Image: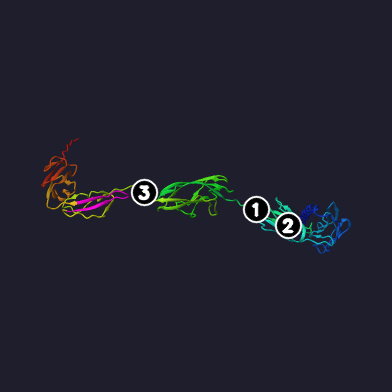
Amino acid sequence: MKNKGQTKFKFSMFFSLLFFISVAFAVFAPSVSYSQSCPNPGPADPGFQWVSAPGGNCWSTGAFTSPSCTWSGGTCNASTVGDMGIFEEYSGPPNGLIYCVSYYGCEAIPPPGGSVCSINSFTADDDTPLYNSGTTIRFSLSGSYPWVITLVDGTTNPSQTFGTWDSGASDTGNLTVSHTYLLNCNNGDAFLPLTVTPEAQQFIDDAQFISQVVPSAMITNEVQQVYVTMKNIGDTTWTASDEYKLGSQNPQNNGIWGVSRDFLGGSESIDPGETKEFSFTITAPAVAGTYDFQWRMVKEFVRWFGEYSNNIRIDVNAPVLPPVHGACGTANKNYQSWITSYGSDTFCTSGTTSPASPAFPAQGGGVGWSCLGSNGGTDSSCTASRSSIGAEYTVRAITTMGGYVKSFDNVIDTRVCGTDCTKSYAQNSTVTLLAVPSSAYWKFNGWFGDCSGTGLCNLTVDVSKTVTAIFVPRSFNYQEF
């Protein structure tokens, strides 16, 4: 069962609106007065009878206590009794219609012999337009009748509010809240409400590209600092927590420069109208070429928005290296006839050896190679030669107990070849011998033969040579305590 208080409130609101509309139409319609009986049975309750009386008095019949309604200056005042609420008949000025109202509904009774306007349609092109935009409301009537569109709820009246047509249209203007319009046809023959509710306000992300500092050329794998400045021209605030970032474009999300995003600081907040300079490092690709550099704002996982930065075509070049000049290594010399390999000697101290592995020269012969330069550097030509067997003499090194003899060219080493060691050398070659005590209990006492003194023994092998290294025990003074 309906709540009686709610129903009374609804009928009260209806009559207030009805009275407002009736007064408004008084200027468009002539004042007509007539008497008309309400239909029996009542409009919604078949067990209820409406009765009208001359002079505007009305009452009800049936099983309920009858209320009394009295016409007074255009308002039907009712005293209600019983459980049924308000029962009213409204007749006379200003619009000449009789309204029979019961607890269950209401009905307008046209003047005798007159035609009644009906509303075919009352619609909006878009009943949920975008926030702060409008739409067009349209209607169609059963004929050409006077009509009025009244703003019942809202802030903006439609562009066209009255006329005498069989159909028409009216623009709502830009709407930010819900609006309800009431179409009244032929001074109250028919009413039809229409509500247009705009979508909720959508906050807009937008950005304007301001400037950037970007190199026009880089070296492969080079690292550079760049700067891209964007302005917030939307109505949202950019923060790191809301996932606002600067993202790479052309192509979107690319990592050409070693990075695809730059971030706001944790506590940074870019309000509408403010600018943000993004500063970050980029790394040039490892392969030379020309690459695009372009960026745009993004709300991660939601949308890209705003202007793109100007696309920059950056030339990435291979590095320009300093020239390398070829230089011969330690193998660029003459070898003794009995030596059979280069040993630890090197072919080039700089540059590239060509051929890569030169052969060791034969006795009495030579081998050549080149040390090639690069990056515009010069080349060097190198030769290794080897003495023939014919012109050779011997060097004999003898050691006493307490040490050994070693040549600087590592050919003679009495620890290897014995305390009496003989090796062959080419004529006029030079040999340097070193005498080394075997422990701290021994000392070198001097050379005997083709060398003298206690220093190095330097020999020119123009004939066979013999030297003896003499070692003696060291003298120690002992003192008893």
Q: Position of residue 460 (x, y in %)?
A: 13, 45
- The stretch of residues the image draws in magenta is 365-384
How packed is label 2: few (under 14 Cα within 10 Å), some, or many (20 or more)? some
Q: Which residue is mark 3?
A: 320
Could you give the CA–CA distance between mark 3 and mark 1, rounded to whole angstroms? 62 Å
Residue 400 seen in the figure: no
Q: Name the residue rendered at 18%, 55% in the picture.
A: 362
The answer to whether any part of residue 54 appears in the image is yes
Between disc 3 and disc 2, the foreground one is 3
* Disc 2 target residue: 193
Q: Say which label, 3 or 1, has the lower sequence index.
A: 1
Query: On residue 133, which mark appears?
Result: 1
Magenta span has 375? yes
Contact, mark 3 vs mark 2 (Cβ under 8 Å) = no
Compared to residue 481, the image places residue 397 above or below, namely: below
Measured as percent of width and height from the top left, residue 436 is found at 18, 44
Tell me: 401 left or right of 211: left
> For the residue marked with disc 1, what is the amino acid?
Ser
Helix or strand or loop: what does disc 2 sit on?
strand
